[in-house]
Amino acid sequence: MMELNHSSENQTTQLVDEILHSIFFLGKINDPQFSPVEILNDEIHDALKLCYPLPFERYLSQLPKRTPFSCVLDMIVFLEGRENENEIKQKLQEIISELHLKKNEPLVSSTICVSQKNPKSEKYYGVSMSTSGRDPGRTMVAASCLPGSWDSDVAGAVMTFNQNKSKKPYFDGTIKLPQHVTCQAYSLHEEGAPMPPCQSCGNLFGLGGTYKVGYPYGNCAEVESVSNLFKNDTEVREQARPTSKLCTPENRSKAEKSVRADLKVLLKRLHFPCNDQFYIPSE
């Protein structure tokens, strides 16, 4: 963290700020809770608090828009170059190894996904939710569905399903990626082996495959990767628009209200202020 802090680039400075807030928030809602002092040793705590005071002040009252490892991914993509897929994956694996983190441990993602319109186009990355436990995971998925995080259409696809993985009867925002678009996940452990899409990603994006498992909707790396693709490629986004007659502005608004209600219940259970105020990293 301190090495990243020494970068003079404004983008990496903002990402460190965002990483700290997200880590502290997840420490707050963890069971048992962990304060910034417990997460960082005294020397690093004092140095980071001096450089980045806002995360230390606002993790108790404001929600992060994404989990820490998503910020780490953005930083590595920025430093390594978007076109260098192998270097990006290798660097993330090195970070996990150096921190002695194992699969499914808090704050670390288990998979990375790469989405691309065609073999010569830009690559867009995403990682799986780096949370531990059911309620923190559901909290971050719900928060990511609200405006300001995931692409609107991707959020709509995820909001099609309830927390228990059942489908809402009144709204269907699922999408189907064009055949020329690739969306491939890889393990960040086990030598980076390719991973087939799960049943949930098949339902969200029309990804084909032999489904062996269905993870909670919004949890997989494919979601963030497709979101980043859509944010930067309007042509693909238009081609993948949801087509269901249930996908109306009124029904989507109802689905979003349901997600907000779920989020309030989760935050209350986690003893966190029930508001929709999101943290904005300092510039």
Image (spheres, rainbow, N blue to C red):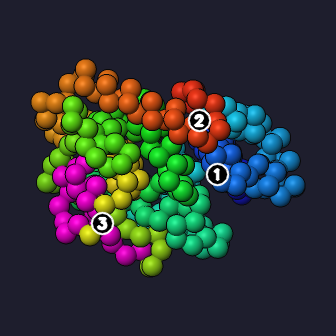
Secondary structure beneath label 3:
loop
Give the mark, 1 or 2, whose residue is nearer the N terminus.
1
Q: Position of residue 246 (x, y in %)?
A: 16, 30
Q: How many marks?
A: 3
- Residue drawn at x 61%, y 70% is 101
Identify residue for label 1: 30
Front residue of 166 and 181: 166
Q: Residues within 10 Å of mark 3 (few under 14, many from 20)?
A: few
Secondary structure beneath label 1:
loop
- Residue drawn at x 22%, y 33% is 171
Q: Which residues are magenta?
A: 192-211
Identify residue for label 3: 213
Question: How far is the residue under mark 1 from the one under mark 2?
Answer: 13 Å
Disc marking residue 218: none
- Tell me which amino acid carries mark 3: Val
Q: Quadrant of the N terminus?
A: bottom right
Whether 183 is among the magenta residues is no
- Residue drawn at x 36%, y 48% is 164
Identify residue for label 2: 268
- Tell me which amino acid carries mark 2: Lys
Secondary structure beneath label 2:
helix
Question: How far is the residue under mark 3 from the one under mark 2?
Answer: 30 Å
- Mark 3 in CB contact with mark 2 (< 8 angstroms): no
